[in-house]
Image: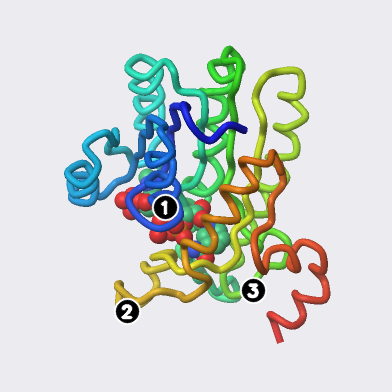
Amino acid sequence: MKTSNNTILITGGTSGIGLAFAEEFLKLGNKVIICGRRQERLNVLKIKHPDLITINCDIADTKQREELCSIVLNDYPDTNILMNNAGIQLAVDLTQPSNLEKIREEIEINLIAPIHLVSLFARHLAGKTDSALINISSGLAFAPISFMPVYCATKAAIHSLTMSLRHQLKNTSVKVFEIIPPSTDTELGHQRRADKTQSHGGIPLQEFLTDAMKAINDDVLEAPIGQSIGLRAKREELFHIMNP
Ligand SMILES: NC(=O)c1ccc[n+]([C@@H]2O[C@H](COP(=O)([O-])OP(=O)(O)OC[C@H]3O[C@@H](n4cnc5c(N)ncnc54)[C@H](OP(=O)(O)O)[C@@H]3O)[C@@H](O)[C@H]2O)c1
């Protein structure tokens, strides 16, 4: 896939992986649209990158997803790449009665929103000569960590969904990518940490970004990055090591 002269919508561009992709794609001469809920972050990013297009949108909300789609398709009809990146990660002990509202929200953001956005954008993308859908899953799609069972299940579902979409879109111009990050140093899961500024660890964002951009550039449609290569290849063996 060409990595310049695109118009790209990235969900969840206010931090972490989405922001890293947004800044890289801007540098490479693309028009980049990001969305997120934290308006103050969007404001700061707009000042830092005046060409960046920022839209406040909570993708957990059906109506806001529809509004996002109509703003993007009306105002930026050149949009030829949708990157489903926004995600949250919760620790859930399913041996206890659980907070179903939080669980529903996690599934809505990580799974329903990408499904809905794909269905809203697919026809538009298929009308372009060069287009792509890029879903961000996780190495945990292949070998889950049991203390965040719902998160891992949503990522396994994104993997499955991406395979089906690749097949459904096979006779169109849309290249369907799955980028499979390993643990990467971002804010992910900060909701469950007492100190919200603490990272959960993982490889540096730049290391992830270099490999992910190479995969996109080289048309590696299913692209495990770093430790995700092992998680995808040896899921059973690694599951037992990760969940002693
Ligand atoms: N970091 C890792 O170790 C890792 C590993 C594998 C996969 N991933 C995946 O990579 C993706 C990005 O995560 P990250 O690590 O970059 O985490 P992050 O730093 O926490 O970024 C998450 C992004 O998603 C946005 N977001 C969350 N809920 C949203 C909502 N309801 N509506 C709109 N935007 C929302 C956040 O924006 P606002 O808070 O401003 O809304 C933020 O921009 C996720 O899908 C994650 O599952 C990450």
Whether ligand 1 has any atom under 8 Å from the Cβ at mark 1 is answered as yes
Residue 219 position by quadrant? top right
Give the labeled residue for mark 3.
146
What is the x, y in percent for residue 60?
Answer: 41, 43
- Amino acid on which the number 2 mark rests in the picture: Ala
The dot on residue 20 is: 1
Ligand 1 closer than 8 Å to the CB at disc 3?
A: no
Residue bearing mark 2: 194
Task: Point out the frontmost of discs 1 and 3.
Answer: 1
Q: Residue at x 58, y 39 (%)?
A: 134
Residue at image coords 70%, 32%? 165
Split into 4 quadrants, where in the image is the C terminus? bottom right
Which quadrant is home to the N terminus?
top right
For the residue carrying disc 1, how many other residues have a C-alpha within 10 Å: few (<14), some (14-19), or many (20+)? some
The local secondary structure at tag 2 comes to: loop
The CA span between labels 2 and 1 is 25 Å
Residue 228 placement, left or right of 187: right
What SS does tag 3 mark? loop
Q: In terms of sequence position, does the residue under pointer 1 or pointer 3 come before the other?
A: 1
Of the four image quadrants, the one with ligand 1 is bottom left
Residues under labels 2 and 3: Cα distance? 20 Å
Residue 95, above or below 211: below
Q: Is residue 88 visible?
A: no
Tell me where residue 100 appears, x and y as whole percent: 48, 58
